[in-house]
Image: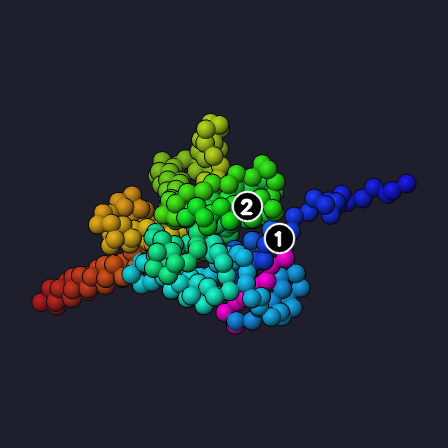
Amino acid sequence: MKTLGKPESNSDVLNKHPTTLLIGVGWVGQYIGKYFTESHYVTEDGIFRKLSDNSEVEPLENYELAFIGVPTPMLPSGQCDTSIVEAVVKQYAPIVSHFCCKSTVEIGTCDKLFLRDDISICMSPEYIGETLGHPLLEPSRETFIILGGPKKTTRVFAEAWTLVTNARTKIYQVNARTAELCKLMENSFIATKVMFCNEFFDLAEQIGADYNELREIFLADPRMSRDFTYVYRNNRGFSGKCLPKDLNNLAFFYRNFVGKRAELIEFLLKRNAELRKDYNNSVPLLGDELKEKNEKTKHINTSKKRRVSKSNSK
């Protein structure tokens, strides 16, 4: 009699993975690798390795798919720096058929690469995060995938995802700009909720109410979600790798490329900067604009002190 143990799929129903390259293996790259387990990966050292055992390998002549998970830091102006994304696409285009960008980028980046360089590329927002107990930190066979770009590219990745998930997974195919904006929309919503709760923390303090008691009765309404409702007395507002960068990215883009202002987003950045002004890791506000504002404020305050000093010496 066969001993019962861990269920194993019959080899007949296991899907063969497309040849896949992970460009960058930080949080995002490692997460994708939990699905596409037969991948190769390459980092800034330019050495190709096998994901399964980290052994060095010769690069294939062609990879059907490549997932990009490289840094897109914020420039001093607040703009999202996509230079590393553009550089790796150019570098690996000779051996990659289709790219999927998991890095957060400026709106229009994938369209630019597709139209300017004739690259088969789509945008797929990634939502894994730093929060303790993050619900998307571990892979799920019943997840959701957003793919934004030309249909001939998104179809390739949609089919690839069906090989590593099950039929309950939702796969959305949209244009690239919608997908790029969606990631910024999500993080802007999170920042809005964080600032909303921080505001009511102060309102509760001002009347002698306990915020945590207020929070619990507020959350008694089933329409309210518990996510992002903690407020940390010694770490106010929002910070981290994503929210400040993404909100600055959004505000800069609309100011400089659309000719409009994302007014709520700019307000959140300003209010957050005010809330965190005494912190060493203060969050930037629209890049250099905050620095210039702070320098002007320091100059005004210094001038006032000088005038007061001169007045007192008379």
Q: Looking at the image, can residue 273 be seen?
A: no
> Is 263 inside the magenta-drawn segment?
no
Q: Residue at x 61, y 40 (%)?
A: 166
Crowdedness of circle 2 by 10 Å Cα count: few (<14), some, many (20+)?
few
* Dot 1: element: loop
Label disc, if present, on residue 159 of the rendered structure: 2
- Quadrant of the rendering where the N terminus is positioned: top right
Q: Residue at x 59, y 58 (%)?
A: 19
Asked which colour scheme the image uses, the reply is: rainbow
Label disc, if present, on residue 17 of the rendered structure: 1
Could you say which is closer to the camera, residue 277 or residue 75?
75
Q: Residue at x 65, y 68 (%)?
A: 55
Label disc, if present, on residue 53 of the rendered structure: none
Could you say which is closer to the camera, residue 36 or residue 213?
36
Q: Quadrant of residue 200?
A: top left
Task: Judge left or right: residue 121 versus residue 5.
Answer: left
Could you say which is closer to the camera, residue 219 or residue 85?
85
Boundaries of the magenta span:
37-45
Q: Quadrant of residue 10?
A: top right
> Is 41 inside the magenta-drawn segment?
yes
Q: Position of residue 240 (x, y in %)?
A: 44, 55
* Dot 2: element: helix
Q: In the rendered view, tell whether residue 2 sits above or below residue 55.
A: above
Q: Position of residue 144 (x, y in %)?
A: 52, 41
Q: In the rendered view, tell whether residue 179 sits above or below residue 203.
A: below
What residue type is disc 1 on? Answer: His
Dominant secondary structure (helix, strand or loop) of the stretch shown in magenta: loop
Q: Position of residue 298 (x, y in %)?
A: 22, 63
Q: Looking at the image, can residue 75 be seen?
A: yes
Q: Position of residue 100 (x, y in %)?
A: 47, 54
Crowdedness of circle 1 by 10 Å Cα count: few (<14), some, many (20+)?
some
